[in-house]
């Protein structure tokens, strides 16, 4: 069993809330960028900026 630390905890948002909207609402992207954590995401995060890396279009 792996033991680690909880990275983020936040109140729930409605189920229809897009992942990028939720990340922005809870300032997750800003926090990751401020501590210089490079984060790899899916295409749903395109336009997030900061330290978020998304796949490029072919």
Image (tube, helix red, strand yellow):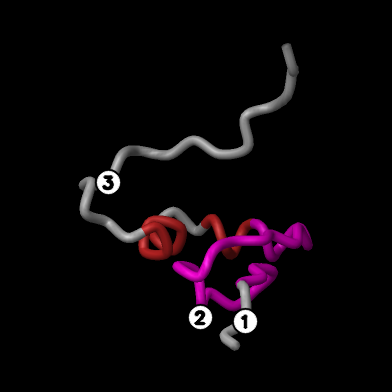
Mark positioned earlier in the residue sequence (1 or 2): 2
Q: Residues within 10 Å of mark 3 (few under 14, many from 20)?
A: few
**Near-viewer residue (51 or 16):** 16
Which label belongs to residue 13? 3
* Image spot of residue 39 (x, y percent): 69, 59
Provide the residue span drawn in magenta. Answer: 32-54
* Image spot of residue 11 (x, y percent): 35, 38
Q: Quadrant of residue 12?
A: top left
SS for tag 3? loop
Q: Quadrant of residue 35?
A: bottom right
Mark positioned earlier in the residue sequence (3 or 2): 3
- Residue holding disc 2: 47
* Image spot of residue 50 (x, y percent): 64, 74
**Residue located at (78% from left, 62% from top):** 36
**Near-viewer residue (43 or 10):** 43
**Residue located at (56% from left, 39% from top):** 8
Task: Decide if residue 38 is on the left or right side of residue 24.
Answer: right
Q: Quadrant of residue 28?
A: bottom right
Check if mark 3's residue and mark 2's residue have beta carbons within 8 Å: no
Question: Residue pushed farthest top?
Answer: 1
- Residue holding disc 1: 56
* Image spot of residue 46 (x, y percent): 51, 76
Relative height, residue 56 to residue 1 (above, below): below
Nearer the observer, disc 3 or disc 2? 2
Q: Determine the CA span between mark 3 and mark 2.
A: 21 Å
Q: Is residue 39 magenta?
A: yes
């Amino acid at each position: 069993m792996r033991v680690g630390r909880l990275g983020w905890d936040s109140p729930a948002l409605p189920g229809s809330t897009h992942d990028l909207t939720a990340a922005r609402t809870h300032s997750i992207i800003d926090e990751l960028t401020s501590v210089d954590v490079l984060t790899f995401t899916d295409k749903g995060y395109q336009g997030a900026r900061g330290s978020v890396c998304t796949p490029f279009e072919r």
